[in-house]
Image (cartoon, coloured by chain):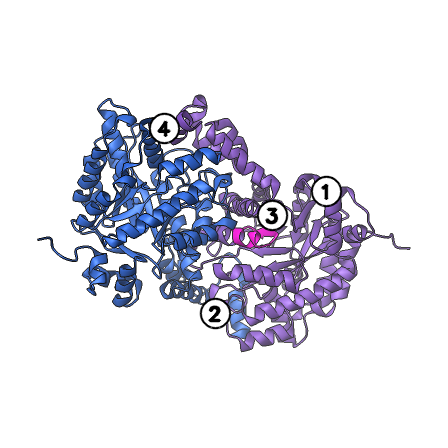
Chain colours: A blue, B purple
Amino acid sequence: MEKQHRTQMEQARAGVITSQMEQVASAEGCPPEYIRQEIAAGRVVITHNLRRNSAPVGIGRGLRTKVNANIGTSKDMLDVELELKKLHVALAAGADAIMDLSTGGDLRAIRRQVLEASTMPVGTVPIYQAVVDTVTKGKSIAQLDPEEIFDVIEEQAQDGVDFITVHCGVTQRVLERLKQDKRVLPLVSRGGTFLAEWMILNKRENPLYEQFERLVKIAKKYDVVLSLGDGLRPGAGVDATDRPQIQELITLGELTEIAWRQGVAVMIEGPGHVPLNQIEANVLLEKKLCKSAPFYVLGPLVTDSAPGYDHIVAAIGGAVAAAAGADFLCYVTPAEHLRLPTLEDVRLGVMATRIAAQAADVSLELPLAKKRDHEMSLARKTLNWQQQISLSLDPENTRELCADKLDSAGEVCSMCGEFCAIKKVKEFLG
Amino acid sequence: MEKQHRTQMEQARAGVITSQMEQVASAEGCPPEYIRQEIAAGRVVITHNLRRNSAPVGIGRGLRTKVNANIGTSKDMLDVELELKKLHVALAAGADAIMDLSTGGDLRAIRRQVLEASTMPVGTVPIYQAVVDTVTKGKSIAQLDPEEIFDVIEEQAQDGVDFITVHCGVTQRVLERLKQDKRVLPLVSRGGTFLAEWMILNKRENPLYEQFERLVKIAKKYDVVLSLGDGLRPGAGVDATDRPQIQELITLGELTEIAWRQGVAVMIEGPGHVPLNQIEANVLLEKKLCKSAPFYVLGPLVTDSAPGYDHIVAAIGGAVAAAAGADFLCYVTPAEHLRLPTLEDVRLGVMATRIAAQAADVSLELPLAKKRDHEMSLARKTLNWQQQISLSLDPENTRELCADKLDSAGEVCSMCGEFCAIKKVKEFLG
């Protein structure tokens, strides 16, 4: 007989507070019972494969906004060591999760190395491996056997992957809409494009949609969180919030409820390129159409015109999205749209996204985020540089930039010198 | 007899479209009559001293969001050549205006060099010079003679300064509030602090408030735009939107109407450190209390916890503020709170602020900003790298980052290689 209450969601519904829930509650500074209730309702997920011992990370309503960093090989840049270095740089910079998006080399071996090396949850996009396997065998994407997709998903779940992106909402109906409603960039999601190509060439429905119950069953077995991918995410601001995108989101909401009925946790992936004035509506739509399942956004990128600085573009969009209720931010690096990221790109991407997350958490009045900002302001008042360093999101960088001040704690610094406003004010306003 | 309709505002009210209005209209892609009407109503200003020939820049409702870069010597970093280099770096990066905040060395000579070197409008904070002159004579700030403040203002206006920051709203009433309503950081505005110190030690009212009509008269003579400084701008998120800040803003609104009655243009300076959820309210308050005078914000900084990355922190706040109606963004560099900015800090500060401005302008659906984003998306669709470079906010940086792709226009690049979503989609969706 199958063991009862295996997934976090099932256990939460049965009133059980798991050790993972306790760890999340402790990290977030909130009662374990709150975590249990929110997981039971689907508004919080813990990305934690039953087969793996990564740090349990809670994502969702009322919790600190989390940050994901993507790494991965490609055929033209097949350096596993470099990708593992990126992983370490991302974790050292404070990423809460890592996605391995490798498409080059021995994908199984690379994934297992990433899972081994990462102390934090690891996510994947299994369709990549299914496609690469097919192409490696000399076949075309159209010849991909749907069975292989499910085999790969089971294999990755068995390996311990904590969450998987599955583009279940790319349906024939959505593709029909895409033909009717012209976009500048019809599809920019790589996984979504693979599926669309397969569907169009074979004139068949998306297997991840058609056999969604089968997918749910695998996810349930290992307690893998399903991250329902947005294959229709806009790749240009001008395409944002259009009918194909929202049509897919409606479908993802329906699938969310099917997964929940089986006790399987779900996140919803979101845009993408979205002008600032449309972000709040996008978050609201996700929360309404998907019954408050955690929202995992890529960006959003609030302008198309700043390649080379897309970490800043995404920090603007991510902060606004998270302040409006998005729960999980996928980092964007300065390399986005231009090249594969370097180690420094990875570090800057994580830092910019953490800034967005902290700004959103302060906006949402999360106590721990507010406390950090408040303590930093007190350290500024007392001109306590050591304290300012340790409270910084990037202490090492702060230490470097204010190295000349460390001997002069409490004294004015070279920025304003004798005209230091903080010191002057202390003299007459206390 | 005095020449009639000297200031842009007076001429606008008299129905005259000046050559400056025409140039602004042309740059913004809107009818000259619109510019005239908005200037007459005080909702748009052109920073253009009658004595100088800087490019006329329009700031205000319906116009592109503008970016200011601060430069300036201090006693401990007295390298005029370096500051002039910063000026050139800022202009090359696309700054719309420069403020000379020098407090070290021969301030007159430095200012004249800055005015000479800058093709764009130049602003100053005259109280700095008044204080430095006093201190240089061996006197204390308390001994500063109010007459000297007005002399310095007249001198700077005569030199051709296009806009001046004057902290007219730091009144005894506001300081009283500041004593009642405790802040973590009572005052962080340097100019505001000088005045507060003088007022407290002398138990007298702020001369810039008491003799505001005199200030307006000087501004009118040279058509200098008065940028009413926010001496009470919060220096910590926890202090934002408090009674002292809003008390000062009410006063600035009253002074705005006095200046307008004399045909003198006004901008209102704004915060500062402000959590994301309070930015819209801050912009709305300014627009209501100050009758839609252009809003010039420093940041806002949406978290206190990211020193070393405050250009990103400010880009988040600036984008949200400008999308809500702020008109002019003062840059913040990565050096903020830590040290004086380097040339690279200046460049990054301008770029981050321009990104915020572009994101806001897209959000506000300004046609030129939308067009740029749209064209960039089309260049991505066609994998046209040259076009992507020339449409970038920082073409040079883009060129460097995608150097390897310039020979392969229209072809897939190394990022996704054979799995290029854009190329695949073209094959089957057209």
Magenta residue check for B117: no
Magenta residue check for B328: yes
Residue drawn at (33%, 36%) of the image: A191
Q: SS class of the residue under badge 4?
A: loop
Q: Mark 4 or 1 closer to N-term? A: 1
Q: Mark 4 points at which residue?
A: B414
Asked whether the residues under marks 4 and 1 belong to the same chain, the reply is yes
Q: In which quarter of the image is residue B2?
A: bottom right
- Residue type at mark 2: give it: Val
Q: Which chain carries label 2?
A: B
Q: Mark 3 or 1 closer to N-term? A: 1
Asked whether the residues under marks 2 and 3 belong to the same chain, the reply is yes
Q: Name the residue under label 3.
A: B65
Q: Name the residue under label 2.
A: B184
- Residue type at mark 3: give it: Thr
Residue B118 position in % (x across, y down): 65, 43
- Residue type at mark 4: give it: Ser
Answer whether labels 3 and 4 touch (C-beta < 8 Å): no
Asked whether the residues under marks 2 and 1 belong to the same chain, the reply is yes
Real-space Cα distance between discs 3 and 4? 36 Å
Q: Mark 1 points at which residue?
A: B31
Residue drawn at (61%, 47%) of the image: B66
Towards the viewer: A181 or B332: A181
Asked whether the residues under marks 3 and 4 belong to the same chain, the reply is yes
Asked whether the residues under marks 3 and 1 belong to the same chain, the reply is yes
Q: Give the magenta-colored segment's residue range.
A: B319-335
Q: Which chain carries label 3?
A: B
Answer whether labels 2 and 3 touch (C-beta < 8 Å): no
